[in-house]
Image: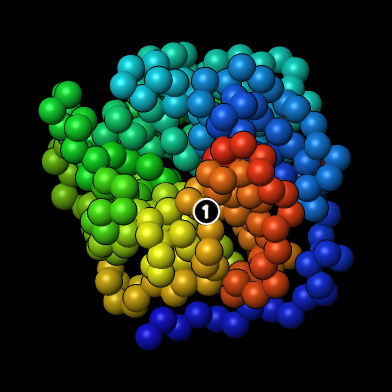
């Protein structure tokens, strides 16, 4: 049985903390920002080629996002703009990554991490896009690229244990997804292909997608867009447990192909997006789930920040 620290009692979510949401409209090719209740919406960027992952560096005044591009072409990219959309530029030019998905900001160490789906790898760079590195490589070439079990999708970084977590979702509704972890650096004398420190944290979730970590309680959260009852859910598990020690706990169900997740840890709330265009909010234990927005196109990545 999974054992998690009880979540704190807070005021009703409608009266909870202020902040700002940044989320991605895949079908419209847009980066949006809004208040946590879905109001006061602003368009940050348009003409984004299939945006998927987003992070915000409040101190520097930057928002970063990934563009998947055309999935069967090596034309993925990462862009950056000011929080209101000015000074937009590529930090990883088209073709610098194949199909970048979820993005993670490690501000303390000046790094961006992301999963590259058809590139079959986990990557990172400096915040300006320099020092581009491949940390994990699960396959190479067109034959491997057709094997969806090799596709890397979600990403999260645990700076305390200096580990990266990523998802490999497998084919749609195949039930062969995996959540894996390894060190943030490749062991000496090894490569991204043969590194010996890769662990399977969870095996065979339906279709795991994006990851987020509650560092205060040391809990990993993730979305799953597979078939119910295990899929179309938000799940959680302690990250300090041994791989496979605890079964995941489902905390939110009935999503419509869940994708993005963002945590407001002090406010005890999570924000979730799905491909049906819904934006949800719920407590960390899944209670008080509400739909903030509906029919917004196809929503993918989401980030929450205090500004």
Residue at (33% x, 34% y) in the render: 117
Q: Nearer the viewer, residue 228 or 208?
A: 228
In the image, what residue occupies the spot 38% across and 38% down? 115
Check the picture and name the quadrant holding the C terminus: top right
Give the quarter of the image for residue 287.
bottom right
Residue 9 versus residue 21 in the image, above or below: below
Residue 69, visible in the rendered structure: yes
Kindly identify the residue that appears in the image at 70 percent across and 72 percent down: 288
Residue 192 percent location from the top left of the image:
22, 36
Question: In the rendered image of this protein, does residue 58 appear above or below residue 222?
Answer: above
The location of residue 267, given as percent across then percent down, is: 73, 65
Relative side of 209 to 8, left or right? left
Identify which residue, 129 or 74, lies in the foreground.
74
The residue shown at (42%, 50%) is 209
Is residue 124 depicted above or below 37 in this figure? above
Where residue 239 sits, quadrant-wise, is bottom left
Q: Is residue 43 left or right of residue 227?
A: right
Q: Position of residue 161 (x, y in %)?
A: 40, 59
Identify residue for label 1. 256
- Inspect this view and state whether residue 305 appears: no
């Amino acid at each position: 049985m999974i054992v998690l620290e009880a979540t704190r009692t807070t005021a009703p979510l409608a009266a909870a903390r202020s902040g700002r949401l940044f989320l991605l409209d895949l079908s419209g090719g847009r980066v949006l920002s809004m208040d946590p209740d879905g109001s006061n919406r602003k368009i940050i960027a348009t003409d984004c080629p299939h945006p998927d992952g987003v992070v915000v560096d409040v101190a520097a005044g930057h928002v970063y996002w990934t563009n998947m591009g055309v999935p069967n072409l090596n034309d993925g990219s990462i862009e950056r703009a000011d929080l209101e959309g000015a000074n937009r530029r590529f930090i990883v030019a088209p073709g610098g990554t194949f199909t970048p998905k979820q993005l993670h900001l490690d501000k303390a160490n000046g790094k961006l991490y992301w999963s590259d789906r058809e590139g079959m790898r986990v990557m990172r760079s400096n915040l300006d896009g320099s020092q581009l590195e491949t940390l994990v490589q699960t396959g190479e070439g067109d034959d491997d690229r057709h094997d969806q079990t090799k596709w890397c999708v979600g990403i999260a970084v645990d700076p305390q244990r200096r580990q990266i977590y990523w998802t490999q979702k497998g084919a749609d509704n195949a039930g062969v997804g995996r959540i894996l972890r390894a060190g943030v650096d490749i062991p000496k004398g090894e490569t991204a292909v043969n590194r010996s420190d890769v662990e399977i944290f969870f095996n065979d979730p339906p279709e795991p997608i994006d990851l987020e970590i509650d560092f205060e309680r040391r809990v990993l959260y993730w979305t799953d867009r597979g078939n119910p009852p295990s899929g179309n859910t938000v799940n959680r598990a302690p990250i300090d447990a041994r791989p496979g020690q605890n079964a995941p706990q489902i905390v939110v169900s009935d999503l419509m192909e869940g994708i993005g997740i963002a945590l407001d840890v002090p406010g005890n709330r999570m924000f979730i997006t799905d491909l049906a265009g819904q934006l949800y909010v719920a407590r960390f234990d899944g209670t008080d789930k509400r739909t903030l927005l509906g029919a917004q196109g196809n929503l993918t990545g989401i980030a929450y920040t205090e500004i």
